[in-house]
Amino acid sequence: MSRTVPWHAPLEGIYHDNSDCWAGRGLAGKQRIDGSGGKRLCAECAKLDRAEASLHHVQWRDVRRAIGE
C-alpha cells in the first residue's frame, strides 16, 4: 500500500491518492492530471488509506512496547 501525491482524470468526479487503487492505476498518459482537481476522494483509495494508517499505528504500538514505553 502506498499513499502518494493525488491525481485525477478530467472526466471523473473523483481523485486518487493510493498507488494500489485498481481504478487509479488505470489512468495513464493524458488522462492522468496531478492534484485532486477539487474532487472527492475515490472510495477504494479511502479504504486503502485507512488500512495503511491502521497498519502503521499497530507497527508503531509494537515498537513502543519493544522499547518499554
Image (cartoon, helix red, strand yellow):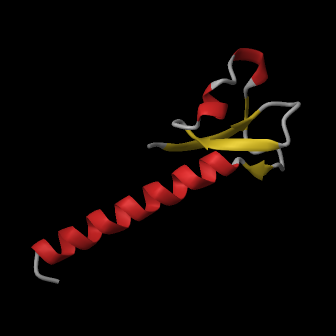
Question: Of all residues shown, which one is farthest toward the left?
Answer: 67
67 w.r.t. 8: above or below: below
Q: Is residue 26 above or below residue 60?
A: above
Residue 13 screen position, x and y as percent: 85, 42
Query: Who's the residue at 70% across and 16% down the image?
Result: 29
Q: Quadrant of residue 59?
A: bottom left
Give x and y (percent) for residue 19: 53, 36
Is 6 situated left or right of 8 in this image?
A: left
Q: Which residue, as the protein is rendered here, is positioned at the far bottom? A: 69
- Vertical order, 47 against 16 (above or below): below
> In terms of depth relative to the viewer, which is nearer, 1 or 4?
1
Q: Position of residue 14 (x, y in %)?
A: 79, 44
Q: Nearer the viewer, residue 64 or 25?
A: 25
Residue at figure coordinates x 11%, y 72% from the top left: 66
Quadrant assignment, res 11: top right
**Quadrant location of the N terminus?**
top left
Quarter holding the C terminus is bottom left
Residue 54 in which image quadrant: bottom left
Q: Residue at x 28, y 67 (%)?
A: 60
Q: Is residue 1 left or right of residue 28?
A: left
Q: In the figure, is residue 61 to the left or right of 18?
A: left
In this image, 19 relative to 8: left or right? left
Q: Position of residue 27 (x, y in %)?
A: 69, 24
